[in-house]
Amino acid sequence: MKTIRVLTLAGAPYELGYIHGKTYAKEIGELTEERLRLCCDPFWTGGQQATLEEVLAIGRACLQYHEAFAPELMEEMHGMAEATGIGVNELVIMNGFTDFVDILANPAVLARYHTPPTRAGEVVDCTAFIVAPSASADGCGYLGQTWDMHASATPYVLMLDVHPLQAPALMTFTITGCVGMIGMNEHGVAVGINNLLGAEGRPGVHWVYVVRKMLAQRTVDEALTVLQTAPLSGAHNYLLLGPTADGALRGYNVEHMASRFAVIPVHSVYVHTNHCLIQEMLEIERPRKALSHESTLARYDQASHFLNAQASSITVETLMALTRCHEQDGPSVCAHVQPGYDIESSGACIMSPSSGKLWALWGNPCQNDYELFKVGHPIEEAPV
C-alpha cells in the first residue's frame, strides 16, 4: 500500500520551480532521460524514427510558443533547470511527452529527415469522467480519472500543493518535474485529461502548461477560453468542471487536436477514454495499436455502463469503485501490465469542486487507498 507523496510549493514562479527541482532532482533527471529515450523509439511515435538531435531541435522550436503562452510557467522551468542542472528544453519535452510524440509522429515535421508511413500509435490510456450535480446522490458534481502510463512512470507520481504569489492555490496529481496534469484550484475549477493520438502534431504548447494555466482561472468558462485559444502541439481530451461567473457548476468535455477542437457541455454523466467520439476529430486521429484500441473501447463501455446504471445516486465511493473495476480476461478500467502491453494505472484522482475536496492515490486503485485533500489544506481524513 502506497501513501501518495505531497510537495508544498509557495512563492514566485522561479521559486516554485527551484524548490520542486531541488527536492526531486534525482527523480526528475531519471524521468527526463527516460522520456527523451522514448521520444527516439518508433513504438511511441507512430513508426517515425527520430534521433536525439532531431528531438532536441523540434523541442527548441516549441519553446517560443511556451514563452509567449505562459511566461510564468517558463519561469518555473528556469528555476527547475537551475536546481537540477537539466536544460529547459529537455524539461519542457519531458513535461509535454504525450503531446510531443504527436509532433514526432507527423511525417511533415520530420520531412527534412525522412518520411516513413504513419503506423499505429503508442499505448497510453486513461479513463475519465464528469458527474453533473443532477447525477449525484448529494447534489455535488465530480470530475475524476485513472492516470495510466508506461509502468516506468509510476514511481514518479506526486501531488503538488501549489501556492503561487499571484494566482489561485491549487493541487495537482502529477509526476516529479511536471508542472501539473490533473487538478483543482481554490475556486473549484477542476481539469482532467485523456491522451489522444493526433495526426497533426506541430511545434506549439504542450498540454501540461495549458492545464496549469486553466487552473489559474476563477471560473470554468475562463478555463475553457484558455484551452480554446492555446496553440497546442498535440492531441488530448480535456474534461472541465467548475463554477460559472454566477456560481453555478458547469462541465465541459473538449476533444482537442492540435489544430481543431469540439466542445461538449455536460449535463449528466460523461465518460471519455482514449479514442475520439466526435466525427470531425476522428478524421485526424492516428490509429492505435491493437491492444490499446481494444482497451480504450472496453474501458469506455465499462465506465459508461457502470455510471449510467447509477445516475442520480452516484457518490464518491461509487467513483472510487469504478476506478477499481476489473473485467475477467480482458482490459479494465484498473489497468495492469500485461505481456506486450506495458501500461498500468499509475494512480487516480477524484475532485469535488463544490466542496474543494480531492481524493488521490498512487499506484493501481485496486491495491491502494484514496487519501483526502482540500486545496490549500493538509489531509483531513483517514484513507478510504
Image (spheres, grey):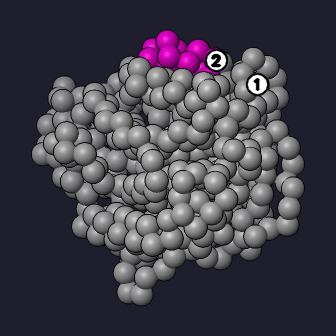
In the picture, the quarter occupied by the C terminus is bottom right
Q: Is residue 292 above or below residue 141?
A: below
Front residue of 233/230: it is 230
The residue positioned farthest toward the bottom in the image shown: 328
Residue 108 relative to residue 86: left or right: left
Name the amino acid, label 1. Answer: Pro
Identity, as a three-letter code, of the amino acid under mark 2: Glu
Residue 373 visible in rendering: yes
Residue, disc 1: 164
In the rendered image, residue 65 lying in the magenta stretch gets the answer yes
Q: Are marks 2 and 1 in contact (CB under 8 Å)?
A: yes
- Locate residue 326, reporting x and y percent: 48, 80
Position above or below: 136 against 326: above
Spatial CA distance of label 2 from label 1 is 10 Å
Residue at x 86%, y 61% (from the top left corner): 381
Q: Camera-side residue: 267 or 219?
A: 267
Q: Which residue is mark 2?
A: 72
Dot 2 or dot 1: first in sequence order is 2
Residue 62: x %, y % from top left = 41, 22
Magenta stretch in the rendered image: 63-74
